[in-house]
Structures are given as C-alpha cells and as structure tokens.
Image (cartoon, grey):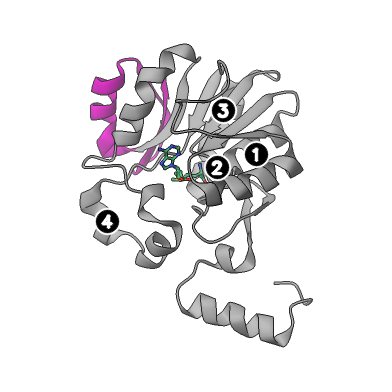
Amino acid sequence: MSSAFSHAELERALLRREAGEPLAHVLGRVEFCELSLEIGPGVFVPRPRTEALVEAAIAWLKPDSRVLDVACGCGALAAAIKRALPGAEVHASDIDESALEFARRNGARYGFAVHRSDWLRSVPGRFDLVIAYLPHVPHAEEDSLDQDYLKAEGPSTVLGGADGLDPLRSILPHLSQHGGLMTLLEVGQIETARQLAGRLQVLAGDEHDQIVLIQ
Ligand SMILES: C[S@@+](CC[C@H](N)C(=O)[O-])C[C@H]1O[C@@H](n2cnc3c(N)ncnc32)[C@H](O)[C@@H]1O
C-alpha cells in the first residue's frame, strides 16, 4: 500500500479488509502475470492458477492472431496476452458493468478492446482463439468456497449451474464461427465437457485443473 495513504484512509482500508473484502478490492489493484491491473468491488479477482492458461494460449497463438478473452472480468487474460504478443489484436468481453468498467481502464492501458456481450452472442467478428476462465463451480460446491470472496465477487462470477458447465453450454453453439476455445476445467468435468463439445483436447493440467482446447 502506498505511503500516500492518509491515516484515515489506511484505517478505512483495514476495516474493509477485516470485514472480509479481498485485498485486491481494498487496494484497487491486483497483480497478474507480473502486470498491475485495476480492479474494484464486485469484480472477480484473477487467480494465479489462470496464469497457466495464459501461457498455453500464448504458445498456441500466432504473433498477429485475433483473440478474445470472453467473460473477462477486469481483463487480466487479455492484458497478459497483449503484453506477450504486441502484434496480436486482442479483445475482451463481459456482461457485468462493474467488470466492464475495470476492463475498459485496463484495456486503455494495455491495448485491448472491450465489448459488452452475453457470452459470445454479440462479439465483433471471427476470432482465431477464444480464451476463457468461465464461472465453472458446480452449485453443490458453493458452501466449500471462500464465503468472503463469494460475497465480494458475486455468485455469477464463479457458479456454473448444477455441474458447473452451463456457461460452456452457452458458448458452444457459437464456437463454429471461431478458431477454437481454450479454457480451464476441473478434472471431474472433462468427460461431460467432451460429450458436450465433441473435439476436446487436454493440453496440460494437474490433479485439479485441466487446460482444454475445443475446436
Ligand atoms: C471466473 S470470472 C473470470 C474473469 C477473468 N477471466 C479472470 O480470470 O479474472 C467469470 C466472469 O464471467 C462473467 N460472466 C458471468 N455471466 C456472464 C455472461 N452471461 N456473459 C458474459 N460474461 C459473464 C462474470 O462477470 C465474470 O467476470
């Protein structure tokens, strides 16, 4: 925290943190892939585990690809891709106005365009790759989540229906217009996702998360 904070501001920040607000929301900043991004209340805080998804996308993309970070939150994935591939045309979209406000600020700083869209319904044109860290937690797992984060970010940023795959179901019908979708799923979701999507390739992963490419 900057030393420019007054005593009163510092006290307010400590109270918000003690009340359970994520540090990123209190500070108004979050680090992701060594970038500093603006963020605020109601917006999903980018998780370190998603950095592996960004690395996989960067390895797959060409230097001048057209790429979309769908359900972008504050635009962390878009910012990291644009930083790694300055010649790429990078776009980001979300439906939530708070997320869009911060994505626009980060887009202006890091060089990506931001759109309001319900999943892929109104994104501009064809993308070589759609990258997404979707809400994908099954409803039954809601109680096991950090309740402070759930309250601060909002359930619609993390919960994905009975099996966590409803957002994927919404995206799949629009995917034929694009080069592919790269996303992160839980190990236990892979088989259902394969049945839904058909051509699903596991690119990398660990005992919890798998990075998949659907084409
Ligand atoms: C898990 S967060 C990921 C955000 C960002 N990709 C990140 O990793 O920081 C999921 C995002 O999906 C967005 N979302 C929820 N419903 C949506 C919808 N119908 N259309 C587009 N985005 C949606 C939420 O606003 C949230 O920003």
Q: Amino acid at mark 1?
A: Ala
Q: Which residue is mark 4?
A: 142
Q: Left or right: where does residue 185 sit relative to residue 162?
A: right
Specify whether residue 190 is painted magenta: yes
Image coords of residue 213 (percent x, y): 43, 23
Q: Left or right: where does residue 185 sit relative to residue 55?
A: left
The quadrant of the rendering that contains the C terminus is top left
Instruction: Give whichever of discs 3 and 2 has the lower sequence position.
Output: 2
Local secondary structure at mark 2: helix
Q: Which mark is residue 160?
A: none
Q: Amino acid at mark 4?
A: Glu
Instruction: Give whichever of discs 1 and 3 has the lower sequence position.
Output: 3
Q: Amino acid at mark 2?
A: Glu
Instruction: Give whichever of discs 1 and 4 has the lower sequence position.
Output: 1
Specify whether residue 187 is painted magenta: yes
Q: CA distance from mark 2 to mark 4?
A: 24 Å
Q: Which mark is residue 80?
A: 1
At 50% from the left and 51% from the top, the residue drawn is: 47
Asked if marks 1 and 4 touch (Cβ < 8 Å), the reply is no
Q: Which residue is mark 2?
A: 51
At 62% from the left and 44% from the top, the residue drawn is: 103
Asked if marks 1 and 2 touch (Cβ < 8 Å), the reply is yes
Local secondary structure at mark 4: helix
Q: Which residue is mark 3?
A: 68
